[in-house]
Each structure stands twice: as structure tokens, then as C-alpha cells.
Image (cartoon, grey):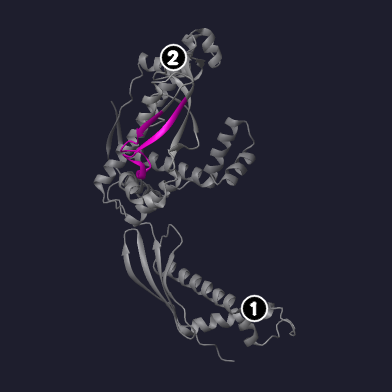
């Protein structure tokens, strides 16, 4: 028997691209479409259970009538997969997400046509990644810093004592209800309970001001204005009548700062021992912040020395990720984007620089390094490494751990090839 003629190639033509995305026009010839249809038809014929026919013996026309839509979907999925595999190879793509499909044309007896739109990691060429000089400045820890930290601890251990017959003041805790007036009869609606510390910005300013005119047990009907920067744009600048009922006021009673307090806070015999521990923690934080500043300054110098793009597709993708994390509605994309775009662009540059360096210098975290880090973390938690590994895997955190280790190696490489001057 002679060989079957080769299948005609799928045509893939690049129609548009920028640093972070590509559009590819795909045409699958009729012969390949027919071959895929024949394959799908045979698959359904062999597995079909149709009344009056033995398995695999139903006429093609009957199978087409019964499974027409499933056959069409199977053909489409198979040809799209083949096209994507060919595009990945032919265009040397580095996709960061699954492609989007646009302008699909799939008619009987005709070639299949559609367009891939794919977000890709840009090719970044670092002309300079060595020889930078950065300054490392560790902020000194003062006695005032230690005392402020001590006060924070005291506030967390403080008791809240009820205050009777007095108007609340900033720093005191209040329990109240607020009911907006609704309907034609202007009757107050459902009251919402709130507990807050005055002065912390938990309520709009007008509400806090009215609350501070009441004593526990009093109620007032008043107009309040929503500030111009209120999160809900529809309410900004609006005035609304509400009923405010103040139920309770409490003042904060701080514990005495003595050796007994130190023992209550932790394993410290004296207050001086607690102060020394707090100073050590603050000094550790100062060093960590100095190291973070060095890394950021080093990246800034790399950005200045190299052309690092910020493709709009990647920036917008990151902004939408921020919106999802902060539960921001999609319709607020424009104002949210205006505020967070500079931060998103900085993050895109950072990832592109580090990814380029990791690839060029082969700095990706290895399985051995991941296992060693898991073992270290497990020992600190007194857990078997296998148990912690399983927990990370179940929570989907292994990829984050791998990324963290890889970034550590990338920054270690950058610092070893630059000069760090301690101020």
C-alpha cells in the first residue's frame, strides 16, 4: 500500500505584537478539519449505544444526528490544541497564561479560522547587571523607639473600663447603633451596630463628632455628610439623615509597666529584660529594612542602566489581580488603575529583571534546595518534613516557596557582583 499524503500544515501568521502580547491568525486547512472530523466520528461510533444497533455498527449518518454537537466540539478542541502546540514551537512563545481565542469561524466544508491572543513574557536583555554601588543604612534604634514598642504591648494588654454619664473622647471605645432614615415617611430603617475606638477613622467624621456630643443612653437624629474621599463613589459628598444611639463608652486602662507585666508578656524576669528583647527585635527589623532598601536601590539602578519594558497587558493583568485581592468591583477599574498603576509597573519591572537574571545565570531553586528549606521550616515548627511538605502542597504554597528561594538566589548573585557600602 502507498503512503497517505501528508496533512497540509496549519497556517500561523503573526498579526500584532507588543512587548507583552502577541496576536496570531490561525488557519486550519479543510483537509485537516475533515481528518479531525473523521477521527471524532469514529470515536463516537465505537462508543455509541444506540437502540437497534450493535456497538460500533451504527451508520455514520445516525451517529452524526445523535452526537453532532459533541463531535463538533471535539473537533474544535483538538484542532485548537494542535494549533497551539504548533504556535508554541514555531513562534518560540513564552506564555504567562492560556491564550484567548477571537474571531472564530468554523463552518461546514470550510477551513477553520481564528485568532490566538496570548500574553507573553517579554524578551529582556540586561546590558548591565554587575558593578553597581549601593549604600546600606541601618536606622539606629533609640530609647524612644523601645518605649513606643513597650506602649504598644501595654495597649494590647489593656483593660477597657466602662465610663458612666460622660461624653466620649478620642481614644475611648464606643458601642453604638446607626439607622438611616428611609422612605416617604422618613422613618429610621434597620439599625446597624458598631463598636469602635474614636479617632481611628472607623466612621465618617460627622458620625464621630455627633457621638462625642452624647452620653451613654442618649439618641440623636442628625444629618451627616459623606467625605469626598469616601470609598463608595456614589455617596461622596452626599448628606443623609441618620439616628445615632450611643449605648456604651469605655476608657482604656493600661497595665503598670513593671516586672510583673514583663512576666505576663513572655519569658522575661524583669522589665529591663523585656526592653532588651524589644531593642533586639527593633534592631533586627532595622537591619531587615536596610537590606530591603539595598535590594530596591539595586533594582532602581538596574532599571536606569537597562531598558526594562512595562507592557500594558502585564500591568493590567497585575492590577486586576490587586482588584481581586482587595475585592474591588470590575466597574471601578479605571480609578483603581490610576492609583495603583505606578506600583504595578514597578512590580512588572522587578519580575522581568529577576526572571531574566534567573534564566541567564541558571539560578532557579532546585528540588534539593526546596527540600532543605522545608526541613528547616519543619524543624522550627517541630513537624516531620513530609507533613509540612504535604501541607504546603495542599495549600498551593510550594510555588511561592520556590519563587522565594529563587529570588533569594537572584539577589545574592546581584549583591555578590556589586559593592554595598555601609553608612
Pointer 1: residues within 10 angstroms few (<14), some, or many (20+)?
some
Percent position (x, y) of residue 197?
44, 24
Q: How far is the residue under mark 1 from the one under mark 2?
A: 81 Å
Q: Which is nearer the eye, 310 or 377?
A: 310
Pointer 2: residues within 10 angstroms few (<14), some, or many (20+)?
few
Q: Nearer the viewer, mark 1 or mark 2?
A: 2
Q: Which is nearer the eye, 3 or 239?
A: 239
Residue at point 60%, 46% (across, down): 394
- Tell me if residue 282 comes above or below residue 370 in the rendering: above
Determine whether the residue tagged by mark 2 lies in a helix, strand or loop. Answer: loop
Percent position (x, y) of residue 335?
32, 47
Rendered-image quadrant of the N terminus: bottom right
Percent position (x, y) of residue 170?
39, 20
Residue at point 59%, 75% (across, down): 70
Is disc 1 in contact with disc 2, using a CB cutoff of under 8 Å? no
Determine whether the residue tagged by mark 1 lies in a helix, strand or loop. Answer: helix
Q: Is residue 243 magenta?
A: yes
- Tally of numbered tags: 2
Which residue is disc 1 drawn over? 44
Q: Which image quadrant for residue 94?
A: bottom left
User: Can residue 234 be seen in the rendering of this structure?
Assistant: yes
* Of the image marks 1 and 2, the number of the one nearer the N terminus: 1
| Residue that extends furthest to the bottom in the rendered view of this protein | 1
Q: Which mark is residue 166?
A: 2
- Tell me if residue 79 comes above or below residue 304 in the rendering: below
Q: Which is nearer the eye, 5 or 228?
A: 228
Question: What segment carries the magenta color?
Answer: 221-245
Percent position (x, y) of residue 67?
62, 78
Amino acid at each position: 500500500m502507498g503512503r497517505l499524503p501528508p496533512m497540509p500544515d496549519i497556517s500561523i501568521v503573526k498579526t500584532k505584537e507588543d512587548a507583552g502580547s502577541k496576536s496570531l491568525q490561525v488557519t486550519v486547512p479543510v483537509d485537516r478539519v475533515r481528518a479531525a472530523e473523521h477521527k471524532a466520528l469514529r470515536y463516537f461510533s465505537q462508543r455509541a449505544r444506540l437502540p437497534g444497533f450493535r456497538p460500533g455498527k451504527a451508520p455514520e449518518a445516525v451517529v452524526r444526528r445523535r452526537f453532532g454537537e459533541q463531535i463538533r466540539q471535539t473537533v474544535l478542541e483538538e484542532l485548537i490544541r494542535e494549533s497551539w502546540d504548533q504556535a508554541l514551537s514555531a513562534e518560540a512563545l513564552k506564555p504567562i497564561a492560556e491564550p484567548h481565542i477571537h474571531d472564530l469561524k468554523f463552518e461546514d466544508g470550510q477551513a477553520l479560522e481564528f485568532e490566538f491572543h496570548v500574553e507573553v513574557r517579554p524578551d529582556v536583555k540586561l546590558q548591565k547587571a554587575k558593578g553597581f554601588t549601593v549604600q546600606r543604612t541601618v536606622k539606629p534604634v533609640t530609647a524612644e523607639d523601645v518605649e513606643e514598642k513597650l506602649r504598644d504591648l501595654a495597649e494590647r494588654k489593656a483593660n477597657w473600663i466602662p465610663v458612666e454619664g460622660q461624653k466620649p473622647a478620642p481614644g475611648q471605645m464606643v458601642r453604638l447603633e446607626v439607622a438611616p432614615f428611609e422612605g416617604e415617611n422618613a422613618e429610621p430603617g434597620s439599625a446597624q451596630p458598631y463598636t469602635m475606638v474614636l479617632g481611628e477613622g472607623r466612621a465618617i467624621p460627622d458620625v464621630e463628632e455627633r457621638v462625642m456630643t452624647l452620653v451613654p443612653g442618649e439618641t440623636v437624629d442628625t444629618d451627616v455628610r459623606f467625605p469626598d474621599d469616601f470609598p463608595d463613589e456614589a455617596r461622596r459628598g452626599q448628606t443623609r439623615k441618620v439616628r445615632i444611639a450611643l449605648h456604651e463608652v469605655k476608657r482604656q486602662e493600661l497595665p503598670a509597666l513593671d516586672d510583673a507585666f514583663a512576666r505576663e508578656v513572655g519569658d522575661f524576669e524583669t522589665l529591663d529584660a523585656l526592653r532588651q528583647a524589644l531593642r533586639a527585635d527593633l534592631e533586627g527589623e532595622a537591619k531587615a529594612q536596610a537590606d530591603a532598601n539595598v535590594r530596591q536601590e539595586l533594582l532602581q539602578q538596574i532599571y536606569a542602566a537597562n531598558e526594562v519594558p512595562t507592557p500594558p497587558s502585564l500591568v493590567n493583568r497585575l492590577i486586576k489581580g490587586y482588584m481581586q485581592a482587595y475585592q474591588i468591583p470590575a466597574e471601578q477599574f479605571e480609578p483603581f488603575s490610576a492609583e495603583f498603576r505606578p506600583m504595578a509597573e514597578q512590580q512588572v519591572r522587578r519580575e522581568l529583571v529577576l526572571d531574566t537574571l534567573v534564566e541567564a545565570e541558571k539560578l532557579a531553586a532546585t528540588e534539593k534546595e526546596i527540600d532543605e528549606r522545608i526541613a528547616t521550616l519543619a524543624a522550627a515548627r517541630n513537624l516531620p518534613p513530609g507533613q509540612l511538605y504535604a501541607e504546603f502542597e495542599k495549600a498551593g504554597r510550594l510555588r511561592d516557596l520556590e519563587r522565594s528561594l529563587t529570588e533569594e538566589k537572584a539577589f545574592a548573585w546581584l549583591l555578590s557582583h556589586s559593592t554595598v557600602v555601609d553608612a
